[in-house]
Amino acid sequence: MDLADSPEDAEFRARLREWLGKALPALPPKPSPDDWPGRRAYDLGWQRTLYDAGYADVHWQASPGVRLIFLEETERAGAPYVGAGFVGLLHAGPTIAAEGTAGQRARWLPPILRGEEVWCQGFSEPGAGSDLAALRTRAWRDGDDYVVSGSKIWTSHAEVADWCELLVRTDPEAPKHRGITWLAMPMDAPGITVRPLRTLAGSAEFAEVFLDEVRVPVGHRVGEENDGWRVTMVTLSFERGTAFVGEVVACRRVLGELAVEARRNGRWDDPALRRRLGGLNAEFRALWRLTQWNVSEAEAAGGLPGIGGSVFKLRYSQARQDLYDTAADVLGDASLDTDRPWVHDRLSSLSYTIAAGTSQIQRNIVAERILGLPKGR
Amino acid sequence: MRFRLTEDQRALRDGVRALLARRFDRAALRAAVDRPGRLDRALWRELGAAGFFALRLSEADGGVGLGLPETVLAFEEAGRVLLPGPLVATHLAAGRVPGAAEGETVVTAVDGGGLVEWLTAADVVCGAADGAVPLRSVDPLTPLHRLPGGSAAVDPVAVLLTAAEQLGTATRACELAVQHARAREQFGQPIGAFQAVKHLCAELLVRVEVARAAVYAAAVTADPADIAAARLLADEAAVRGARDCLQVHGGMGFTWEADVHLLLKRAWLRTRRAGGGTESEELLAADLLSRAAR
């Protein structure tokens, strides 16, 4: 067991740190959260900067250990995360790289890496959340096109996306996992309506996407027809190992800020609150170690992320909610003022036990696939 | 960074596991419950001969010359089978008290919080135990005395090795719960097919894995804040794990015959070592401020 960087890792970290020190001061000012075109330009600009410096494909090429260092150092330095590049870099891109033809890889991958095209994800539907395979958006062949009708929900960055990785049902007669196909849909095709979806936090991070006989060329299909579920599983497992690295680093910083604020406003004198902060320190230290453990295991398994991601996500999503509930305790009445720091984070933390597989679904996965308990209802 | 067990560490863990499976199986555990207060000296010597107490002693001093990570793995195995005796105190006395390293001398210690385990059975007591009062111990496998007065200084290594024992007990609780959930049938199916039971088992595993990462990392860094974190998470994994394991066992779990209560009682006892977890929480709270100031 070893937690220290290898000489190569230490060199990668030092070089990255030095580069971040020079690159970050040159960043333009951050756009406002409602300025979608501004956010797109900002996020893609950062991706272009990474590309020019040779870091664009760190999520795809590098070992999990190098990815961990990259995410840790960029978060520590306050660099932007992938933003609008999320689906392209962490979902659609890796899927195309693994399952696409040579022509598809050449068409779609370079613009993702260069920060030129934005992807969104059309997976969830109003009737298909945890039970994603129950999706009903239909696609049927008409010559060299698929014609697609249906609706998608929880699509982030849909307003500014160029492409949508879309799951459609191509065989309604087959068992539900076997009749699904993965398509790359151009977002400027006729018949697409995007409607912003306001969340409980008041912001419109997501959208609903309505599809009315949208034509998608057959050449935009990745993988075989009706093999989309398997193709999608490649995508879904890709980011599990390192998905929350930056966030855990950020949570540990917030925890320090909370302690300082509690000391300033006198709440620190309450032993119960102080002990709760101490307990959260233990919690996030352990989550950081669990990340390092999972990454080391993934590295030993040839870079494949393991099932440890479900264990991590269960605990982390709860810890994040506890962190911001404790922040509200530190703030007191100010926790009701949405202009104060941490209040918006408290609201958005509520999605963590739901998004990307609810905690209940994650527990089923852990119980059935790791502990080997029987499937049931 | 290679934060996983090396081949040698795996081999060491498997060796300790095999020794304990041979010398302290379930029958031995239940026999020990029926003979409270008696320590198996032959087993103690066998542990000594296998290097259990001398793991961190240098080879020049007749020890095994390994580090905290290996020691933590050995103590985890001991915790997994609820091995009785003042294991931590004897390990810490190796090289300082004659015969401790070899398992010839049983050493106990006045714990940081004022508790003394196995006082009557031990050959040597580290710390002043005068005036120690016996308690009727909740754990049938750990005789207890308590000093009415103050408490002694706390050795972080003792805290870490206790966390390793808790981790082992938590792992065992998870295994027993899953075994029972697969075997026990109600309403015509294994109870493990019900989500309510499944989710208890899943949470058991999550707490074990989080605690494992914290305990192993603390063994690598030996940092006081990492050790405090390991302690809190391992205590939680063991106590809540044993509670949930008991719940999964239903009525069976409330009997003396089932082993679950032995897990819970030992886990409770260990949470009181070194004055309880409050000190660890305060240490970690103070650590937040000192790190923020840096």
Image (cartoon, rainbow, N blue to C red):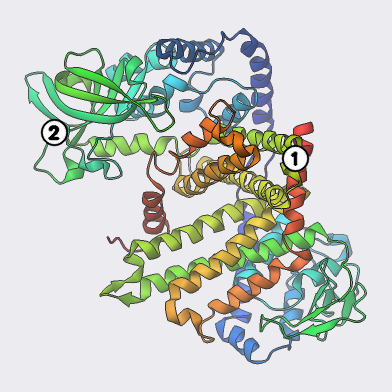
Is A179 on the left or on the right of B6, as rendered? left
Is A134 on the left or on the right of B172, as rendered? left
| Residue B24 x, y percent position in the rendering | 62, 80
Q: Is residue A148 above or below residue B274?
A: above
* Callout 1 crowding tier (Cα within 10 Å): few <14, some 14–19, many ≥20: few
Q: Residue furthest front?
A: A333
Q: Which mark is residue A170?
A: 2
The Cα atoms of the two marked residues, 1 and 2, are separated by 62 Å
Tell me which amino acid carries mark 1: Gly
Element on which disc 2 rests: loop
Tell me which amino acid carries mark 2: Thr
Q: Is residue B110 above or below residue A2?
A: below
Residue under label 1: A266
Whether residue B150 is visible: yes
The nearer-to-camera label among 1 and 2 is: 1
Q: Considering depth in this image, is A34 or A301 the residue closer to the camera?
A: A34
At x 37%, y 21%, the residue is: A157
Whether residue B67 is visible: no
| Residue B255 x, y percent position in the rendering | 50, 85
At x 49%, y 37%, the residue is: A349
Q: Considering depth in this image, is B168 or A29 the residue closer to the camera?
A: A29
